[in-house]
Amino acid sequence: PSEIALLTKLVTLDLGFNHFNMSAPIELGQLTRLRTLSLESNKLSCALPSELGLLSAQLRTLKTSGATSATAVGALPTELGKLEALRSWSNAENTFPSALPTELGNLGALTQLLLHRLASTGAMPSELGQLSQLKTFTLYSTQLTSTIPSELGAMTSLTGVYIFDNAGFSGELPSELGYLTNAVGIYLDGNALVGTIPAHFSSLGGGLKTLDLANNKLEGLLPAALGQLTSLTCLHLENNAFTDALSSSLGLLSLLETLDVSGNALRSEIPPELANAPLSILCQLTANGTNGTVTNRFDGPVPAAVAAKCTVSILPSPPPPSPPPSP
């Protein structure tokens, strides 16, 4: 009801997990002392009201995940970019098919931004790279058609990057992601990324524990610089188009427990140095690719210490071509 505007001293308002099938009241913008507002898990018929931008002085937490119905209309208001005090915004699983406004880059105090499973269209705004305080960022399973902006490399406070399962994401991995030296987990799997792994990824080092680049269209050599990511416990590179040898530098990853490079086009011998990594959970070196064809073809013999830890299949070399028939 419009009378909600009379609650001028309210600091927390939780309207979540109801079945409201109306528009969010514009009078919410008059509750200027609000620090926490939750509209999540409702069936609102319209996108968020632009009047929420009036809550710029105090609002710290905004929860709008799943707030709208499947038939909701409207767009994310650009006025949300005025919420200069906002620390956390969860806006996942909403259905209105509008673009993400570039004004989101003005939310300089944000430490958490959850935008997964959106019906939003268009590109990922490069202005998000201005969110230098952001620690957790999700943008997976969306309808966006975009590249990964190089500006994301400026989000140097990030500890978790979750940009995966976006069929419309293409282009190359920006080398600037190597500046994300506070990252613990980087998940970029299930997109349509192309090109090579930038050598600058070696700068991630530090506390990076998981790097997941699986199920893309990456190619070229596996850079020896991966061996400098000495905190890695999990490395997923499966179902790409990497070629040539498996780098012996992976043996330098003394904490590595999970390694999957299956479904590529790797050749040459399996480096015995790989046995130096613990690989206590999974080491998958060869397997059928996603299109049903066997890809990796390592030369034997398999180093015994590696065979004890890994699933390895040495495929026979193809037979030589038959000689041409005699004239």
Image: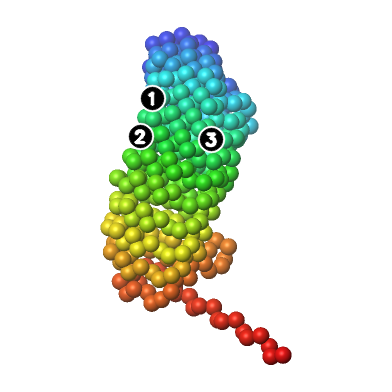
Name the residue carrying label 2.
157
Q: Amino acid at mark 2?
A: Ser
Neighbours of disc 1 within 10 Å: few (<14), some (14-19), many (20+): some
Amino acid type, residue under disc 3 in the picture: Met
Q: Position of residue 276 (x, y in %)?
A: 28, 64
> What's the mark number on residue 109?
1
Residue 233 lies left or right of residue 320; in this view the side is left
Of 129 and 40, the residue lying toward us: 129
Q: Is residue 268 above or below residue 134?
A: below
Asked whether the viewer can see residue 17, the reply is: no
At which x and y percent is residue 291? 58, 62
Instruction: Establish if 152 lies above or below 166.
Output: above
Disc 1 residue type?
Answer: Ala
Whether tag 2 and tag 1 are in contact, CB under 8 A, the answer is no
Q: Give the colouring mode of the picture.
A: rainbow
Q: Residues within 10 Å of mark 2 (few under 14, many from 20)?
A: some
SS for dot 2 = loop
**Tag 1–tag 3 contact (CB < 8 Å):** no
Displayed quadrant of residue 298: bottom left
How far is disc 1 from disc 3 in space, using C-alphas? 19 Å
Q: Earlier in the sequence, mark 2 or mark 1?
A: 1
Residue 180 occupies which quadrant of the picture?
top left
The answer for how far apart the CA atoms under marks 2 and 1 are is: 12 Å
Name the quarter where the C terminus is drawn: bottom right
Check the image and report above or below for 184 versus 301.
above
Q: Find residue 124 and name its label.
A: 3
